[in-house]
Amino acid sequence: MDQPQQNPQNNMTSPAHLNWLYIAIVVFLLLVLGGGVWWYVSSKTPLQEQKKETASQDQTASWKTYRNEDFSFTLKIPPEWSNYVVDKEVRPAGSEFVYGSGKKSQFPWVIYNLGIKGSDLGSTYYPDQTYNLITIIVFEISDAKKLDIQSEVKNTFTVYKFVPTATKYFVLYKGSCQDCADGEPFTKLRKGTDEVIETFRAE
C-alpha cells in the first residue's frame, strides 16, 4: 500500500516552525527599534551640547578676564566677583600635595587662590582675610603624574578641572567651605564657581 505523502505546507505551519518565525520577527523589530533610538540620541546630543555651550558663551561674553602672564592662562570673572584678589604661593621642590602621602614633587609648583576679601563681604567676616573661591595649581607634567594629582583631587573635591598642556599641568578646584551658611554673601558668590572654572583657558 502506498504511504501518504506529507504535505510541505504542513511543515511550514508546524508549531515549532511558527515559534522560530515569531522569534525572528521580534528580533528584527528590536533591531529596527534599537537602531532608531541610537540614531535619535546620537543626532540630538551634539545639538544639545552645542546649544548649552553657546548659551554659556553668551552669558560669559561680557565678563571681565583675569589673565595670568606667568603661565599664560585666562579665567572669566563674573560681575559679582569684581573685587576679587589673587594670592600666589610657591611650593618648593620635594613638597607633598597631600601631607603624609610620601609622594614628593621633583620641581616647585605654584598655587593661585582667587577669592574675595572679608571687607567686601560684610561685617560678619574678617576684613583682612581672603575667602577662597577657586584654587588654580600649576605643575610640571612629570610631577602631576608622580603626585597622582587626578586621584588625589577627585577623592577630595567635588568640583574640579584638569587641563594638561605641552609643558604644564593645570588643576582647578572649588575648595571646601567653612563659612557657607545659607543666605550668606560668600555662599551666594560660590554658586557661580562651577561656571567660572569652565571658562579657564591655557595657551
Image (cartoon, grey):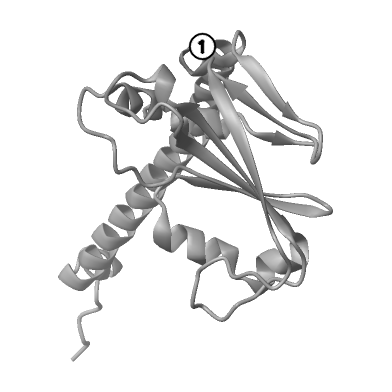
Q: Which residue corresponds to the image point at 60% horizontal and 77% vertical from the top-left?
A: 103
Give above or below for 17 relative to 113. Answer: below
Residue 146 position by quadrant:
bottom right
Other-residue count near label 1 (Cα within 10 Å), few / some / many at <14 / 14–19 / ≥20: few
Residue under the image location 45 percent in, 31 percent down: 193
Residue 66 image-quadrant placement:
top right
User: What percent of the width, then of the height, locates residue 11?
Assistant: 25, 71
Is 17 on the left or on the right of 121, as rendered? left
Q: Of the residues shown, which amino acid type is indicated by label 1?
A: Pro
Between residue 49 and residue 45, name the one nearer to us: 49
Above or below — where is 58 with respect to 2?
Answer: above
Q: Which residue is mark 1?
A: 79
Q: Is residue 4 visible?
A: yes
Image spot of residue 109 (x, y percent): 71, 57
The local secondary structure at tag 1 comes to helix
- Looking at the rendered structure, the number of numbered marks drawn on it comes to 1
Q: State the quadrant of the C terminus.
A: top right
Task: Spot the residue most to the bottom.
Answer: 1
Query: Where does the image place residue 176, in percent across and percent down from the top left?
Result: 37, 47
The answer to which of 26 and 141 lies nearer the viewer is 141
Q: Nearer the viewer, residue 154 or 121?
A: 121
Residue at 51% across, 68% down: 98
Residue at 29% of width from left, 20% of height from top? 123
